[in-house]
Image: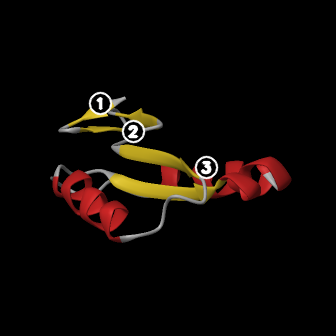
Amino acid sequence: MPIRQYICDFASHKHRIVIEADGGQHGGEDDKRRDVVIKADGYRVLRFWNTDILGNPEGVAERIAERLTERSPHP
């Protein structure tokens, strides 16, 4: 899902949330800069390691559901 100059793994414009599935190449300064830009547009960013998604899908789904019930930040 394109947001600004980035391609996000998953996004909901309605809920103003971005979900990223991260492998070993993630977690550095590039991701921090990317998150700042995306958050500046009023999105919440959730990042999950691939190992968590594969090993604990129920926990990941619960965390996403929790965030969906929270109010979105105003852009």
Residue farthest toward the top in the current orientation of the protein: 1
When asked about the image quadrant of residue 13, the answer is top left
Looking at the rendered image, the disc whose residue lies closer to the viewer, 1 or 3, is 1
Residue 16: x %, y % from top left: 33, 43
Residue 64: x %, y % from top left: 59, 51
What is the secondary structure assignment of the residue under circle 2? loop
Q: Residues within 10 Å of mark 1 (few under 14, many from 20)?
A: few
Q: Earlier in the sequence, mark 1 or mark 3?
A: 1
The residue singled out by tag 3 in the image is 65
The residue singled out by tag 1 in the image is 2
Residue type indicated by callout 1: Pro
Q: Earlier in the sequence, mark 1 or mark 2?
A: 1
Q: Residue 31 versus residue 11: which sits nearer the camera?
A: 31
Residue type indicated by callout 2: Cys
Distance of label 3 from label 2 (alpha carbons): 19 Å
* Left or right of residue 48: residue 6: left
